[in-house]
Amino acid sequence: MSEKRKIRVLIADDESHTRVLVRQLFISMGADVVAEASDGAEAVEAFEQSKPDIVLLDLNMPRMDGIRALKRIREISPGAFVVMLTSLSSMEVANECIKQGASGYIRKDASTAQIKRTILESWKDYLDAAKKQDGEKG
């Protein structure tokens, strides 16, 4: 039986206080935050270097916005698990993120409990889909 490893997380947000809060949230969930980025270009580079299991990606960042970073990450790894984080409440933006391959969408004004629930539910759905896909291949 192999030892269960911690889930590896990349947090990308241009606001350092948001990264601190999200890092603490993931640590409290038993995850390992392996990289942080303050803009979309850094996020793509950090994704390539750290190969995280989960990416939490802010929508509005300098140099490269979250949707462009999401597209690049999905080009690098089509199966990447990315959850978008934003202060915007537009359903059009949320739908665009999902259309581009995001596994979920979290508003920054959500409670800690809501954020945890969204991440855990999205992660479970992602793992279930991956198992189903592996079963179809086998």
Image (cartoon, rainbow, N blue to C red):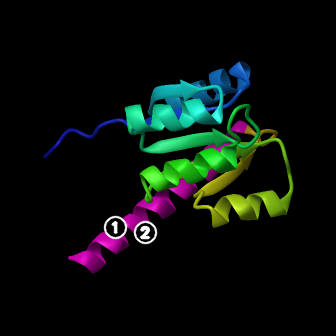
Question: Looking at the image, do the residues carrying marks 1 and 2 touch, with CB atoms under 8 Å apart?
Answer: yes
Q: In which quarter of the image is residue 53?
A: top left
Q: What percent of the width, then of the height, locates residue 89? A: 86, 52
User: Can you say whether 66 is above or below 130 in the image?
Assistant: above
| Residue hosting label 1 | 131
Residue 66 shown in magenta: no
**Numbered range of the magenta stretch:** 112-138
User: What residue is at 59 percent from the left and 49 percent from the top?
Assistant: 70
Q: What percent of the width, then of the height, locates residue 110? A: 78, 43
User: Can you say whether 78 is above or below 24 in the image?
Assistant: below
Which three-letter amino acid code belongs to the residue tagged 1? Lys
- In the drawing, does residue 134 fall left or right of residue 57? left
Q: Could you classify mark 2 by the number of other residues whose Cα lies within 10 Å: few (under 14), some (14-19), or many (20 or more)? A: few
- In the drawing, does residue 108 fall left or right of residue 30? right
User: What residue is at 41 percent from the left and 60 percent from the top?
Assistant: 127
Q: Can residue 90 be seen in this view?
A: yes
Q: What percent of the width, then of the height, locates residue 102? A: 60, 57
